[in-house]
C-alpha cells in the first residue's frame, strides 16, 4: 500500500476472511480482500528558471498522496443461514435457478447446483454491495463485477472471491480508473491508471503490491512526463523526465525521486521559426540529491564550455572554461567564479572583456574548443563567414596548387555568402522533414534528409551516386559503418562545406582548370540544381507530412535489415553498401515476390527516380543504393503488394493499426493525453536509435535531444502485437466511452459515421504500410534469421555428432585391436598347452613306469625320479 494512503471501509462490510457454513450440505464460501489504493498526484508548478541553471526544477506534480481517494474492499460472504428459498429443487436440494434469502438481509439470485451456489448469479449484501458473475461451489470464481453504493465498481477476473487476474476498477468519487493485472486483490503486474476524467494524468507500466515499481511512464496533469524506472511509487533508477512548461529535460539516474548519479540535464531554448542554434544549455556529469555536484561539463547555448568540478550547483574546484571565442582559462573556481578573478562573470552567453584575464588559445590538436575554425591555417585573414559557418574544405584545397588555395577559399566564401539566405532556408526546410515537433523549435539535418535534398536537385543524375557523395563528404575519423548511416547529423556550417565539396566533385570535369574552378563549380550547382529544385520534395517518404511522421517509425528496424544485406566495397574506406542485385536477392531470400510484386515491378519502382537502374532495355544491377532509396522502394512495394487485398474499411484500419489514431490530435495532445503515445517517445528515427538494443525503438520525439539510452530499452511500440492493435478508450462520468483526449469515441455501428476523403486516404495508406512491414517484411526477415539460426545450430549439431562418432569409432577400433591381441595371446597359450600335453604323452609311451620294471629296493635305498620335459614346461610357466 502506498505511503499516506488511508482506508475507507464500506459500512456493514466485514473485511476479515471467513469461511461460512452454507446450506444443508455444509459447504463453505469465502471472499478475501486486501484494500487497494489508487492515488493522485498534484503539486504547485513553478515555471521560473534562475540564471544559475538550477538542475532540479521545482518538482511540479510532486507526489502528494491524496487522502480523499476513495477505494473499497471486496466484501466477504459472512456466516449466514438460509431463511427462505424460492426456486427449483432436485432431490430436496436447491438445484437450478432460484432466490435465496439469508439471515441478515443478504440475497442471492441465480443458479444453484446440488445445494450450492454454482454458475451465474447476483449476490447482494445487506448494505447494498453487489457481486454479479460466476460462482463455483459457493465461491465467486471466474468473471464478475463488484458494485458499491457510490457507483464504484470492479469488473474482471475473480479467484476465490478476490480480484485476481485482469480487471478494471473505477472509483466514482475521484474518477480514477485502473486497468490491468491484479494479484491477490492488489494491483500487481502491468496496468494503466487514469487519475482524472480527462485522462490527462495517467501512469502506464509495472506495479508491485499497489505501488509503481519497475518500468513505467507517468504523465502529470501539467503535461510533464517521466519515463523510466520506479521503486515504491517514486522515480528510482534510470529514467527521463521532461518539464514541458519549463523547457527542461533530465536523462539519467534517479534515487528516491531526485537526480542522483550520472545524468544529463538540458535547458531548451525555443527559437523563432527558421533560426538555427547549434547547442542548448546542457550539463552532463554527476548529480547528488538533485544538484550538480562532482565532475561535470556544462555546454552553454552560445558555444562556451565549462568542464571541471562542481559543488551544490556551482563551479567549485579545478576546472577549464572555454569561452565562445575559443580562449581558454584553466584554474581554480570558487562559488561559481574564478578564484583569481572573483568579479568576472561566467555566464557563457556574453562576450567578456578578456584583457585582464589570463587565458590562452587552444592547441591545434585540442578538440575541446567549441569554435575552432577548421582549416584556419590556410588563410591569413579572418573568415568571411564567421566561426559559426567557417568552411572545412581542407581536403579539397589540397588538390589545388598551393599558391591558389587562399584565393580560392576567399572566392568560395563570397559565393556562399551571396547564397547564404537560400542555403539557410533550405537547411531549415529539409531538417524538419519527418518531424512533427521539436523541444526548442530547431532541427539538425540528418543524412537521410540530405539524401532527399540531393535527389530533389537531381544530383544523382549527374553521373554520381548518393553513396559516392557520402564518401566525398565523410570526415576522416568517421568509422566505416557510419559513412552511410541515415541517422548522422550535421550543423549548418558542415552542410555548407558539403555543398562546396559536392559541387567540385560533380562538375570539375566539365569545367576547364583555372584559379576560379571552385567558384565556377559551386555557382553552377546553385544555379542549375539547388535553387530551381530545392523544396520541391519528391519520392515516397517525405512529400506527405503525415505519411512521413508515420513512416519513420519503421526506419529503425529497416536500417538493421539494410545493414544485414550490405556487402563490403573494394574502396579505401572499406564501407558497406547495397546494390540493386543485393536488393533483388533480399526479396528472393525473404520470399516476398508474388503475382503482383515481381522482379520487373521491383525494377520499375527503383527506376521511378533513378532511370539508371532500369530503362526497359537495360538493367544496372551493380548500382549502389543508399538507405533512402532502399526505404522508399519498400514503401513502393507496400503500395503494390497490398493492391490484391483490396480496400479495407476505416473501422478495421483503426482497430488494426494504432498509428492511424494519431492523425486527429495535435502533437502536444499526443504527448500529454495518451498512454498509447508514450510508445512513440523512445528516440528520434531521423537522429538515430536511443539504445542499440534488441528491440526496435521508434519515436517522433524529434530534434537533436540526447535521448535516454535505457539498458532495458523497453519496446512498448510493438506494431505487430495484438495489445497495441486496439485503440484504448476510457469511460467518462456518464459511463460513455471516450478517447484519451476526452473526445467521444466514434459510433462503430455505422450510423452517423462520416469521414472526409483525406482521412480515408490516410487511413488506407497507414493500413497498407502497416500490413506490409509488420505482417510481411519484418516477419519474413525474422523467419530468415530463425532459419539461419536453426541451420547453424543443425550444422553445429551435425559437427558435434560427427566428432562424437569419430571418437566412438576410434574407441571401437582401439577396443577391437585390444580384443584381437588378447585373443591371439589366448590362442597361443592354448597351442603351447596342447603341444606340451602331446610331448608328455609321447614320453609316457616311450618310457614305461619304473614301478613296473624295477625290483623293490631296500628301505635304506634312495629313489631318484627323473622329471619329464612336459612337466618342466608346466612348472616353469607357473
Image (spheres, helix red, strand yellow):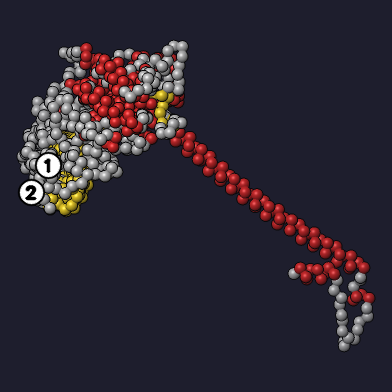
> Does the rendering let one see residue 204?
no
For residue 174, side relative to residue 846 (left or right): left
Q: Residue at x 12, y 47 (%)?
A: 356
Q: CA distance from mark 1 to mark 2?
A: 12 Å
Element on which disc 1 rests: loop
For residue 597, side relative to residue 172 (left or right): right
Q: Residue at x 86, y 71 (%)?
A: 868
Q: Position of residue 248 (x, y in %)?
A: 14, 37
Q: Residue at x 27, y 25 (%)?
A: 411
Q: Residue at x 13, y 23 (%)?
A: 743
Relative to the observer, which residue lies in front, 383 or 87? 383
Crowd around label 1: few <14 · some 14–19 · many ≥20 (10 Å)? some
> Which quadrant is home to the C terminus?
bottom right
Mark 2 sits on what residue? 343
Mark 1 sits on what residue? 352
Q: Position of residue 801 (x, y in %)?
A: 54, 42
For residue 296, side relative to residue 644 (left or right): left
Relative to the observer, which residue lies in front, 273 or 675? 273
Above or below residue 339? Residue 730 is: above
Amino acid at each position: 500500500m502506498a505511503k499516506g494512503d488511508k482506508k475507507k471501509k464500506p459500512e456493514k462490510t466485514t473485511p476479515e476472511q471467513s469461511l461460512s457454513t452454507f446450506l444443508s450440505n455444509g459447504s463453505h464460501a469465502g471472499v478475501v480482500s486486501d484494500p487497494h489504493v489508487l492515488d493522485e498526484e498534484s503539486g504547485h508548478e513553478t515555471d521560473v528558471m534562475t540564471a544559475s541553471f538550477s538542475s532540479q526544477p521545482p518538482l511540479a506534480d510532486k507526489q502528494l498522496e491524496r487522502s480523499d481517494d476513495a477505494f473499497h474492499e471486496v466484501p466477504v460472504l459472512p456466516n449466514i443461514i438460509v431463511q427462505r428459498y424460492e426456486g427449483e429443487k432436485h432431490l430436496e436440494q436447491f438445484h437450478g435457478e432460484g432466490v435465496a434469502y439469508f439471515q441478515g438481509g443478504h440475497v442471492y439470485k441465480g443458479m444453484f447446483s446440488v445445494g450450492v451456489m454454482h454458475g451465474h448469479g447476483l449476490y447482494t449484501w445487506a448494505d447494498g454491495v453487489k457481486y454479479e458473475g460466476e460462482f463455483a461451489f459457493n465461491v465467486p470464481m471466474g468473471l464478475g463485477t463488484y458494485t458499491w453504493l457510490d457507483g464504484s465498481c470492479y469488473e474482471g477476473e475473480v479467484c476465490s472471491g478476490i480480484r485476481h487476474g485482469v480487471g478494471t476498477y473505477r472509483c466514482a468519487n475521484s474518477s480514477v480508473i485502473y486497468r490491468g493485472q491484479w494479484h491477490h486483490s492488489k494491483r500487481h503486474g502491468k496496468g494503466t491508471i487514469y487519475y482524472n476524467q480527462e485522462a490527462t494524468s495517467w501512469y502506464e507500466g509495472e506495479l508491485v503490491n499497489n505501488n509503481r515499481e519497475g518500468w513505467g511512464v507517468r504523465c502529470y496533469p501539467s503535461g510533464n512526463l517521466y519515463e523510466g524506472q520506479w521503486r515504491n511509487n517514486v522515480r528510482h533508477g534510470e529514467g527521463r523526465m521532461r518539464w514541458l512548461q519549463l523547457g527542461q529535460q533530465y536523462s539519467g539516474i534517479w534515487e528516491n525521486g531526485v537526480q542522483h548519479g550520472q545524468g544529463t540535464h538540458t535547458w531548451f531554448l525555443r527559437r523563432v521559426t527558421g533560426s538555427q542554434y547549434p547547442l542548448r544549455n546542457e550539463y552532463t556529469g554527476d548529480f547528488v540529491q538533485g544538484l550538480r555536484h562532482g565532475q561535470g561539463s556544462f555546454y552553454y547555448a552560445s558555444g562556451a564550455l565549462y568542464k571541471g568540478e562542481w559543488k551544490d550547483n556551482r563551479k567549485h574546484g579545478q576546472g577549464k572554461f572555454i569561452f565562445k571565442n575559443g580562449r581558454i582559462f584553466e584554474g581554480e573556481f570558487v562559488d561559481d567564479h574564478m578564484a583569481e578573478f572573483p568579479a568576472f562573470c561566467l555566464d557563457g552567453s556574453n562576450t567578456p572583456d578578456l584583457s585582464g584575464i589570463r587565458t590562452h588559445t587552444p592547441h591545434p590538436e585540442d578538440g575541446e574548443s567549441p569554435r575552432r575554425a577548421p582549416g584556419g591555417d590556410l588563410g591569413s585573414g579572418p573568415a568571411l563567414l564567421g566561426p559559426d559557418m567557417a568552411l572545412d574544405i581542407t581536403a579539397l584545397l589540397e588538390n589545388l596548387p598551393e599558391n591558389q588555395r587562399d584565393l580560392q577559399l576567399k572566392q568560395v566564401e563570397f559565393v556562399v555568402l551571396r547564397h547564404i539566405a537560400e542555403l539557410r532556408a533550405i537547411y531549415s526546410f529539409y531538417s524538419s522533414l519527418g518531424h512533427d515537433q521539436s523541444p526548442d523549435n530547431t532541427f539538425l539535418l540528418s543524412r537521410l534528409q540530405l539524401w532527399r535534398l540531393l535527389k530533389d536537385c537531381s544530383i544523382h543524375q549527374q553521373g554520381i551516386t548518393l553513396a559516392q557523395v557520402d564518401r566525398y563528404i565523410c570526415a576522416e575519423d568517421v568509422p566505416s559503418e557510419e559513412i552511410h548511416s541515415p541517422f548522422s547529423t550535421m550543423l549548418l556550417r558542415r552542410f555548407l562545406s558539403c555543398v562546396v565539396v559536392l559541387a567540385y566533385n560533380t562538375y570539375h570535369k566539365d569545367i576547364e582548370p583555372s584559379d576560379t574552378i571552385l567558384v565556377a563549380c559551386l555557382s553552377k550547382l546553385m544555379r542549375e540544381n539547388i535553387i530551381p529544385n530545392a523544396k520541391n520534395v519528391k519520392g515516397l517518404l517525405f512529400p506527405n507530412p503525415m505519411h512521413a511522421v508515420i513512416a519513420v517509425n519503421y526506419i529503425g528496424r529497416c536500417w538493421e535489415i539494410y545493414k544485414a544485406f550490405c556487402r563490403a566495397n573494394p574502396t579505401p574506406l572499406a564501407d558497406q553498401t547495397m546494390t540493386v542485385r543485393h536488393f533483388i536477392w533480399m526479396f528472393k531470400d525473404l520470399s516476398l515476390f508474388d503475382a503482383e510484386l515481381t522482379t520487373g515491378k521491383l525494377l520499375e519502382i527503383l527506376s521511378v527516380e533513378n532511370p539508371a537502374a532500369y530503362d526497359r532495355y537495360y538493367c544496372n544491377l551493380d548500382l549502389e543504393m543508399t538507405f533512402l532509396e532502399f526505404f522508399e522502394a519498400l514503401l513502393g512495394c507496400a503500395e503494390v503488394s497490398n493492391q490484391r487485398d483490396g480496400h479495407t474499411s476505416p473501422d478495421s484500419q483503426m482497430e488494426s493499426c494504432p498509428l492511424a489514431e494519431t492523425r486527429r490530435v495535435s502533437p502536444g495532445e499526443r504527448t500529454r493525453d495518451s498512454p498509447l503515445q508514450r510508445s512513440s517517445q523512445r528516440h528520434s528515427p531521423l537522429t538515430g536509435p536511443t539504445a542499440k538494443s534488441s528491440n526496435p525503438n521508434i519515436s517522433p520525439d524529434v530534434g537533436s535531444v540526447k535521448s535516454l539510452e535505457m539498458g532495458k530499452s523497453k519496446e512498448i511500440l510493438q506494431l505487430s502485437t495484438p495489445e497495441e492493435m486496439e485503440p484504448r478508450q476510457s469511460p467518462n462520468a456518464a459511463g460513455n466511452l471516450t478517447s484519451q483526449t476526452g473526445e467521444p469515441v466514434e459510433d462503430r455501428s455505422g450510423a452517423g459515421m462520416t469521414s472526409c476523403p483525406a482521412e480515408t486516404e490516410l487511413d488506407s495508406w497507414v493500413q497498407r504500410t502497416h500490413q506490409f512491414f509488420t505482417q510481411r517484411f519484418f516477419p519474413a526477415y525474422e523467419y530468415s534469421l530463425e532459419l539461419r539460426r536453426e541451420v547453424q545450430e543443425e550444422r553445429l549439431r551435425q559437427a558435434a555428432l560427427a566428432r562424437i562418432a569419430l571418437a566412438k569409432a576410434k574407441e571401437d577400433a582401439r577396443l577391437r585391436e585390444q580384443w584381437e591381441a588378447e585373443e591371439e595371446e589366448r590362442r597361443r597359450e592354448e597351442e603351447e598347452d596342447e603341444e606340451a600335453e602331446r610331448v608328455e604323452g609321447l614320453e609316457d609311451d616311450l618310457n614305461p613306469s619304473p614301478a613296473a620294471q624295477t625290483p623293490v629296493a631296500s628301505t635304506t635305498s634312495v629313489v631318484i625320479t627323473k622329471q619329464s620335459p612336459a612337466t618342466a614346461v608346466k612348472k616353469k610357466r607357473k
